[in-house]
Image: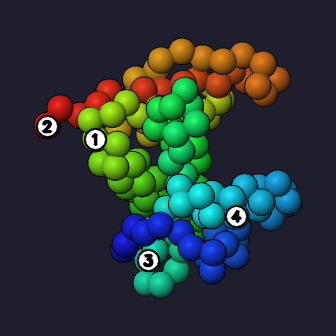
Amino acid sequence: MRIRPAVKDDHPALCAIDSVAADDLKRRADIADWIQQGCCHLIEIEGEAAAYGVLTHHFFGQAFIEMLMVGTSWRRRGLAGTLIAHFQSMSSGAKLFSSTNMSNRPMQDLLVKAGFRPSGYIDNLDENDPEIVFYSPPSRS
């Protein structure tokens, strides 16, 4: 297993493991944009893209895990947690944020397990499903 920045040639593989991209042209375009911006990282196992994550700095200038996606056949193996730890190490000494819908209990549990704390919520993004913002404090070296 290795984690590396995604490159243009990875686009089809990332779209194939993304549960939204199959039916959503915007998601496919987002993946291409994230790759081009250099903020998309993937986990590769035996030459196959298994998961990807996106770390941006658009959230009030702070590091923000914008996306985590694990391919269906690779789930329940700790890959999302591995990506979170990777992003935490990339952001050591700085604040790190992420968010998820209130209905997405598995993601909430994953973030808490990784040391994140709830930091507030945003109404009206998805109807009747508030977005919970999570915060990982800067690591103290």
Density class for disc 4 (Cα within 10 Å; few <14, some 14-19, many ≥20) is many
At a point 65% along the width and 30% down the height, the residue shown is 101
The N terminus sits in image quarter: bottom left
At a point 42% along the width and 54% down the height, the residue shown is 83
Which residue, given by chain and number where applicable, does mark 3 sit on? 45
Give percent across and percent down for residue 81.
40, 50
Lower sequence index among marks 3 and 1: 3
Position of 125 with respect to 6 (left or right) is: right
Q: Nearer the viewer, mark 3 or mark 2?
A: 2
The kind of residue tagged 2 is: Ser
Lower sequence index among marks 4 and 1: 4
Lower sequence index among marks 2 and 1: 1
The kind of residue tagged 4 is: Ala
Do the residues under discs 4 and 3 have CB atoms within 8 angstroms?
A: no
Density class for disc 1 (Cα within 10 Å; few <14, some 14-19, many ≥20) is some
Do the residues under discs 3 and 1 have CB atoms within 8 angstroms?
A: no
User: Up-down: is 68 above or below 118?
Assistant: below
Position of 1 with respect to 33 (left or right) is: left
Density class for disc 3 (Cα within 10 Å; few <14, some 14-19, many ≥20) is few
Which residue, given by chain and number where applicable, does mark 2 sit on? 141
Do the residues under discs 2 and 1 have CB atoms within 8 angstroms?
A: yes
Density class for disc 2 (Cα within 10 Å; few <14, some 14-19, many ≥20) is few
Which residue, given by chain and number where applicable, does mark 1 sit on? 92
Q: Is residue 55 among the parts visible in the rendering?
A: yes
Give percent across and percent down for residue 116.
38, 30
The C terminus sits in image quarter: top left
Measure how far apart labels 4 and 1 are at the Cα level. Answer: 27 Å
Instruction: State the mark number for residue 32.
Output: 4
Position of 114 with respect to 39 (left or right) is: left
Q: Is residue 115 among the parts visible in the rendering?
A: no
